[in-house]
Image (cartoon, rainbow, N blue to C red):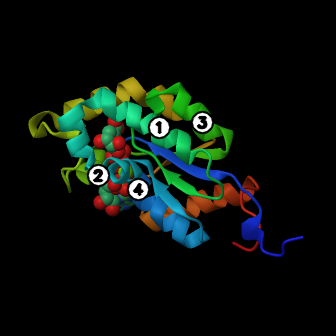
Amino acid sequence: MPKSFSVIPMKNIVLIGFMGTGKTTVGRLLANRLGRPFFDSDKKMEYENNLSIREIFEVYGEFYFRQQEKMVIAKLSHYKNAVIATGGGVVLSLENMNNLKRNGVIITLAASVEAILERTGRRNTRPLLDDFAQRERIIKKLLKERAELYYNADYSINTSSKSLQQVINEILFFLRQGGYLRGKR
Ligand SMILES: Nc1ncnc2c1ncn2[C@@H]1O[C@H](COP(=O)(O)OP(=O)(O)O)[C@@H](O)[C@H]1O
Ligand SMILES: O=C(O)C1=C[C@@H](OP(=O)(O)O)[C@@H](O)[C@H](O)C1
Ligand SMILES: [Mg+2]
């Protein structure tokens, strides 16, 4: 019998949620905390295409981006013990969600329009929010379209007025309560 807990295959911890809710940042910190590998579907797509997300949108368009996203999610879903941050639009595909759920516990990060505006305004890396004058309207529209899809999760956290550390502690509490973590961590 292996002594180390880490070799026991465990579910992936998958973060979903709208742009700017903190998936990439929280995912990386959580993975460090748990000593698990971290993957971000956008980063993996950028690496595999040798293009930034912005370039993929500009050169090939959103449809191609969504196809690439599906391929990356299908690959990541075969991993074990990982923390996976997804892009905000991953919920648009039921195939993505079914893949992620097969071996993952799904956690939604949510945030108010104000927090999303503030957090996504720091760096202009999201092609869907390029039109600066229309950002608030676009965020509200997309949130409305997707709201129900983000409920497709095992747990949900409103991060609006929480620090990164508070968000991580809340995730850890949920994971421990749910028996998703084994060992001392
Ligand atoms: N709870 C939080 N409190 C304050 N800032 C946050 C919080 N969560 C994320 N951020 C910041 O918001 C920005 C967007 O976060 P990011 O992880 O890229 O979100 P996502 O991957 O969900 O789009 C980053 O600058 C990040 O540091
Ligand atoms: O919501 C979306 O459709 C998108 C979210 C982005 O990821 P983040 O949620 O990490 O910003 C990125 O995948 C792309 O710009 C499209
Ligand atoms: Mg991200």
Q: Is residue 67 above or below residue 79?
A: above
How packed mark 3 is, by other alpha carbons closer than 10 Å (few <14, some 14-19, many 20 or more), is some
Classify mark 1: helix, strand or loop. helix
Residue 24's disc is 4
Contact (Cβ within 8 Å) of mark 4 with mark 1: no
Q: Quadrant of ligand 1?
A: bottom left
Q: Amino acid at mark 1?
A: Met
Instruction: Give the mark nearest the N terminus, 3 or 4.
Output: 4
Instruction: Nearest to the eye among marks 2 and 3: give it.
Output: 2
Instruction: Give the mark nearest the N terminus, 1 or 3.
Output: 1
Instruction: Give the mark nearest the N terminus, 2 or 3.
Output: 2
Residue 99's disc is 3
Tell whether circle 4 marks a residue whose Cβ is less than 8 angstroms from ligand 3. Answer: yes
Real-space Cα distance between discs 1 and 2?
A: 15 Å
For label 1, the residue is: 71
On the image, the x and y values in percent for residue 71 come to: 47, 37
On the image, the x and y values in percent for residue 107 come to: 56, 46
Classify mark 4: helix, strand or loop. helix
Q: Is residue 174 above or below residue 185?
A: above
Q: Amino acid at mark 3?
A: Asn
Real-space Cα distance between discs 2 and 4?
A: 19 Å
In this view of the protein, which residue sits in the foreground, 106 or 9? 9
Instruction: Nearest to the eye among marks 1 and 3: give it.
Output: 1
Residue 50's disc is 2
Q: Which residue appears farthest toward the left when viewing the image?
A: 133
Contact (Cβ within 8 Å) of mark 2 with mark 4: no
Q: Residue at x 40, y 31 (%)?
A: 67
Instruction: Give the mark nearest the N terminus, 4 or 1.
Output: 4
Classify mark 3: helix, strand or loop. helix
Classify mark 2: helix, strand or loop. loop
In this view of the protein, which residue sits in the foreground, 160 or 30? 30
